[in-house]
Amino acid sequence: MTSAASHSLPIDPYLLTNDQADRLDSARRTLVERCMRRFEVTYQPPAPATPFRPKTRTQYRYGITDPVEAARYGFAPPGSPRTPPKPPPPPSLTPEATIVLTGTDDPKVKPGTAAAKGGQRIKGRTVPPGGCTGEARSALRADNAEAGGDAPVADRINTGSFERSQRDPRVVAVFDQWAACMKQRGFPAYGDPLKAGADPAWRTPEASAKERETAAADAQCKKEHNVVGVWFAVDAAYQRQEIERNAKELAAVKAELATRQELAGAALGTLPPRP
C-alpha cells in the first residue's frame, strides 16, 4: 500500500466528518446570533478558522507518502501552512453584550459554560445559563465534556490505536527496514518516519532543498518496504478490538451523531446530509 488516503479506519463512522463538524459549527453560530438578537444585540460570530485539513482522516496519518509531492513540498502537505496562523482578534463587545454572549462577567468563570449561570436581566429578558453561547451548545447537545467534538470513547480509540501501532513488533520491523533504507541513501538515522517529519530543521517558512530530499527519500523508503500497508493494517486491527469491547457505548455514539446532525439541520432549516 503506497497510500492510505482512500482507506477508512474502523472508527471513522463514530467520528465527525469535516462536513458534519462544519455543519454543527454553522448551526452553533446561527443559534448564537439568533439569541443575541433577542437581547437587541447585533452580533456577528467570528467566521470559523479555515485550517488545512486532509481530504480523508488517513491521508497523512502515516506521514507523507508521495515521493514526487514530497520532492516539491517537503514534509508539509501541499496547501498546509508551515507556521500556525494567528487567530483573529475577538469582536469588541460592551460589558452588557458580553454577559448576554457568555452568561457571566466574572473573570474566574469560564464563559459560555454551565459555571456561567446566567440569570441576569437585560433588555427585559433573562440571560440563559452560559449566555447565548451556552444556549446554542445546549440546543445542539454539545454542552457536555467534549463540547460538541468527538465522543471521548471514539477519540480514545482513534488516538490509542495509532500510539499502540507504533510499538507493535510488526510495525517496528518495517520501521527498522525504513531506517536502513534511509541510511543507505545517506540520511540521518531518525528511527521512524514520524521523527523524520518532526525534525526541528524543517521549521522554516519555505522547504529547504535538504528537507525536500529527505522527504522524498522518506516516501520512497516507505513505498519500498510497505510501511504504510503494515502500519495501517495494525492500526485498524487495534481499532477493531476496541470497537468490539466498546460496542454498546459506540452504538450510542453513532445515534448521538445522527441526532446532533438533525438538530443542526433544524437550526439551519436544512436536512442533514445522508451518511
Image (cartoon, rainbow, N blue to C red):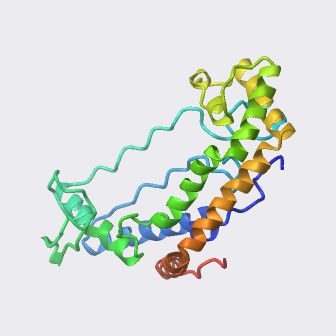
Horizontal relation, residue 218 to residue 128: left or right: right
- Residue lying at the far front of the rendered structure: 169
**Image coordinates for residue 63, horizontal then vertical, percent:** 69, 41
- Residue lying at the far right of the rendered structure: 224
- Which picture quadrant has residue 206? top right
Residue 235 vertical placement versus 40 (above, below)? above
Nearer-the-camera pick, 46 or 265: 265
Residue 143 vertical placement versus 220 (above, below)? below
Quadrant where the C terminus sits is bottom right
| Residue drawn at the location 32% of the way across and 66% of the way down | 133
| Residue drawn at the location 79% of the way across and 35% of the way down | 219
**Image coordinates for residue 21, horizontal then vertical, percent:** 54, 64
| Residue drawn at the location 77% of the way across and 49% of the way down | 230
Q: Is residue 55 visible?
A: no
- Which picture quadrant has residue 106? bottom left
Horizontal relation, residue 134 to residue 71: left or right: left
**Image coordinates for residue 38, horizontal then vertical, percent:** 28, 75
| Residue drawn at the location 66% of the way across and 48% of the way down | 61
Horizontal relation, residue 108 to residue 206: left or right: left
Residue 71 vertical placement versus 108 (above, below)? above
Nearer-the-camera pick, 257 or 51: 257
**Image coordinates for residue 152, horizontal then vertical, percent:** 45, 64
